Amino acid sequence: MAQVSVRQVVKSYETYQAVHGIDLEIKDEEFVVLVGPSGCGKSTTLRMIAGLEEITSGEIWIGGDKVNDMPPRDRDIAMVFQNYALYPHMTVFDNMAFGLKLRKYAKDDIKKRVDEAARILDIAPLLARKPKALSGGQRQRVAMGRAIVRHPRVFLFDEPLSNLDAKLRVQMRTEIKKVHQTVRTTTIYVTHDQIEAMTLADRVVVMNQGRIEQVGPPQELYHNPATRFVAGFIGSPAMNFLPVRVIDDGGLKVQLSSGVKLVVPPARVAHYAPYKGREMTLGLRPEHLTETRDMEKPGVVLFDALVDVTEPMGMETMVHFFDDGAPVCARVDPAFPCTPGHTITLAADMNQMHLIENDTGRVV
Amino acid sequence: MNATVQPSGRRPARLTTGRIGLYAFLPISALFFLTPLYVMMVTSLKTMPEIRSGSILSWPSAHNLDAWVRASSQACTGLSCNGIQTGFWNSVRILVPSVAASIAVGAVTGYTLSFWRARGAKTLFAALMIVAFMPYQVFIYPLVRLFAMAGVGNSLLGIVLVHTIFGLPTMTLLFRNHFAALPMELFKAARVDGAGFWRIFLQIMLPMAVPIAVVAMILQVTGIWNDFLLGLVFTGCRNLPMTVQLNNIVASSQGERLYNVDMAATMLTALVPLCIYFISGRWFVRGIAAGAVKG
């Protein structure tokens, strides 16, 4: 059990800098997910915390110890890898016991710990098997078992579910959450899948190009993204971005490039007024562009759209259309009639709008 | 729906010209390689009068093992007449430590180069590969001088060292490529689990390198057993390997040339690599395939 501090950590390679001085404080027992597109530095950061990658400058602290120059084995961490990294010539039991044996635990203590981990992960009948004889999901469980038997101060997960098929991934996601609730160990989890980040994390760290874009609980990131990058990365389907001009013709409005004017809700008028006359970007999530249902709500604006493509998902239907060349996605009730080539009326819930500065990418 | 699909077009010919050529080529090439072996075998079983009178390919009239006995325990090289058996035991004494040492050093070097990314590892590997293609003769004189100065010239230790050094590039290449095909995460997982340099090597990597170790063993056993030049130069007179002794027997120029003994001695010398191939041929293929496709 430990808190982890990453202070001004930089990682440079010969030709480029992968991580640009990031700061991160992780509380004891917290589940933190590092998320971002590939090449954003999240895996490098994790490996630096693990000690598998040297840090160029900065400091990393685990539970009150500065671990900059400590080899991985002295950091008291456990790591789960994307490709499981099980030792192929050892049985499941030996795979899980390997780290304990190296740390000179007593034989019966090792057995007790492995059995307990096997019980938590439901792999007790597999202990005598070799990894070759296991399915992907089972291998991933063993890899997690190898991590929990040690009762380390920190768990590190490096894209642990990326090798599994979609259905198993969802199932293992729940398993990981359950394990964390049982074992309550500080966990740092790296993924490129924003849904994994949203569902697992106490706090999500969104990274982009070697920098931290935003840190916060999943809901906060979803509803109050700090930058255009976070707004676009979190949420699926992604948020719609439309070029707009902030105008005032008897009330503050944003005007789309197609000419449609959307009224800014009263609560935001004072906040957005300073941007009057400027070219900005409007961010609006698909679920806030719906069929006309609760028209009584203030701030809801109607407009027409020519349907391009529809994607029925069962519990909802995604409607794709263009606003002066900019692709837009709306999320409507499956019963709502919309056929490609026809014009429908949609309602934009402007209470949920985001206004983004074009040059800085900052959400204002 | 019709149950069967009728084949259409001309039935493909069973026997094409290519096939006929192949079937003709295979027995001919087999004969080409087997004939010398056959000649050696039958000659070694004949008596000298029979060799002088008969055809080289004729079947021996009586299976006479005298030549084999003489070759192994009575044939003369220089002043001693103990047969080729001294050479056999000399070769074994050279072979076992040389094979063990060269594989061990190659495996550790290959492991270090592929996982520990030491400073200058790439340069070192490139240098090793360049050296692998240099002819031995270039190194012999400097090495002889060096060994003489170090006091290991003309000794068993000297020849073991030489074989280990000359085996290093091939062994390193073999093991490095095998380890490079293994996922890096395996190594990282072992480090996080708390294993150090040697423990990762001995408990994780080496057990996974068994197929490639078998390949290495076959290469080294045959290479070192068949070596003539290094054995001649570096062993001194007391440890001459079997190949050198065989040459001394076969090339001796005094008295009557005993073809049957020469043949028997040659067969005896070839026995070890032959056995290795027969026993481990299956492993050899498996090891190469394992390295080629995936680790």
Image (spheres, coloured by chain):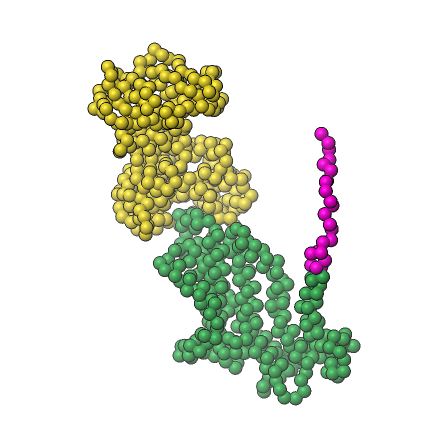
Chain colours: A yellow, B green
Q: Single out the residue that lies furthest toward the right.
A: B61
Q: Is residue A112 visible?
A: no
Q: Single out the residue that lies furthest toward the left.
A: A274
Q: Is residue B85 visible?
A: yes
Majority secondary structure of the magenta segment?
loop
Q: Is residue B15 magenta?
A: yes
The residue shown at (41%, 31%) is A195
The image quadrant of residue A174 is: top left
Q: Single out the residue that lies furthest toward the bottom.
A: B255
Residue A348 at what x, y percent from top left?
35, 18
The residue shown at (34%, 51%) is A71
- Up the image or down, A6 lies above or below A275; here it is below
Which of A29 and B282 lies nearest the eye of the viewer?
B282
Residue A211 at what x, y percent from top left?
30, 39
- Up the image or down, A279 lies above or below A56; here it is above
The residue shown at (48%, 46%) is A86
Give the residues in magenta. Answer: B1-23
Which of A171 and A2 lies nearest the eye of the viewer?
A171
Residue A340 at what x, y percent from top left?
47, 21
Which of A198 and B90 lies nearest the eye of the viewer?
A198
Q: Is residue A214 magenta?
A: no
Q: Quadrant of the N terminus of chain B?
A: top right
- Up the image or down, A184 lies above or below B15; here it is above
Residue A341 at what x, y percent from top left?
46, 20
Which of A333 and B64 lies nearest the eye of the viewer?
A333
Query: In the figure, is residue B41 to the left or right of A348?
Result: right
Count of marks overlaid on the render? 0
The residue shown at (70%, 59%) is B21
